[in-house]
Image (cartoon, helix red, strand yellow):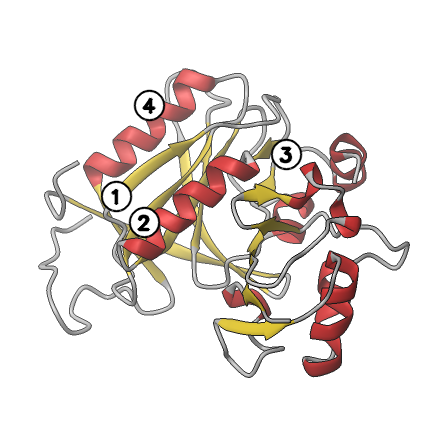
Amino acid sequence: MAIEVRVPTILRSYTGGAKTVEGSGATLTALIDDLDAKHNGLKGRLITPEGGLHRFVNIYVNDEDVRFLGALDAKLSDGDSITILPAVAGGALGFAAAAALLGR
Amino acid sequence: MTAATLGPGKSHGNVNDVLTIDSAIVDAIVAHARRDHPDEACGVVAGPIGSDLPARLIPMDNAARSMTFYEFDSMEQLRVWREMDDNDEEPVVIYHSHTATEAYPSRTDISFAGEPGAHYLLVSTREPDSEEIRSFRIVDGVVTEEEINIVDATVDA
């Protein structure tokens, strides 16, 4: 089962510079495990040590933010297109407070 | 500030340590920041891939609508990033305002900075009559301030 994954510039050091990679998996978790097996270290940039989706990235299945699709439990099908983008956020607020505000 | 001739080659000096940007774009960014004050304003200036020339201003919603935090709406961001892709553009500048503090990246800004190729432009609107505008590269948590070279009429804004 092939799922196309678009990788942002900041994570291309894990994919040998590739903009697009292929993976497989019935859920986002399974896909990320598959990607990590081929591109060691990628998982750590997408999933926190606590096992949640990292707040520094947005992941989309086709045109939908996975946070609206069950996050890591999002179901995937052959031919789906995954896009990873760096979340763009910041501001004068202290980091801990910002993280709490984001609730992720 | 001197008027630079923009063209092929490196004559315009956007090599690592200078942001060259049109005055009309800077004026529009400042106007956006003033309009949203005291909330933080944010947006992108897209430019042709590899040009390092900010050409198309895209003000973004601050989904956090906060005086101390900004966040692009994830769906708006997907639309804008796709559009840039379709136009062979990239985010040359990512800007936001600080409304009560200086125009210097906070720890939060540094933690989130995810576009190593972009210039991070900060505008402080804490003074009612003047703006502090500064530009930075943020790569792997390292902040490097750079000069801003404001020029006239490089783009139709």
Instruction: Describe the element under mark 1 as helix, strand or loop.
Output: strand
| Residue at image coords 70%, 41% | A69
What amino acid is at disc 1? Arg
Q: CA distance from mark 1 to mark 3?
A: 26 Å
What amino acid is at disc 4? Ala
What amino acid is at disc 3? Ala
Q: Earlier in the sequence, mark 2 or mark 1?
A: 2
Where is residue A18 shown, x and y percent of the image? 50, 77
Residue hosting label 3: A92
Q: CA distance from mark 3 to mark 2?
A: 24 Å
Residue hosting label 1: B56
What amino acid is at disc 2? Ala
Residue B127 appears left or right of A52: left
Q: Earlier in the sequence, mark 4 or mark 2?
A: 4
Q: Which mark is residue B31?
A: 4
Residue B98 appears left or right of A92: left
Instruction: Describe the element under mark 4 as helix, strand or loop.
Output: helix
Instruction: Chain letter for mark 4, please.
Output: B
Residue B118, located in which quarter of the rendered image? bottom left
Q: Residues within 10 Å of mark 3 (few under 14, many from 20)?
A: many
Tell me whether the residue at label 2 lies in contact with that at label 1, contact meaning CB atoms closer than 8 angstroms: yes
**Which is more toward the observer, A55 or B85?**
B85
Circle 1 or circle 4, nearest the eye: 1
Residue hosting label 2: B46
Q: Residues within 10 Å of mark 1 (few under 14, many from 20)?
A: many
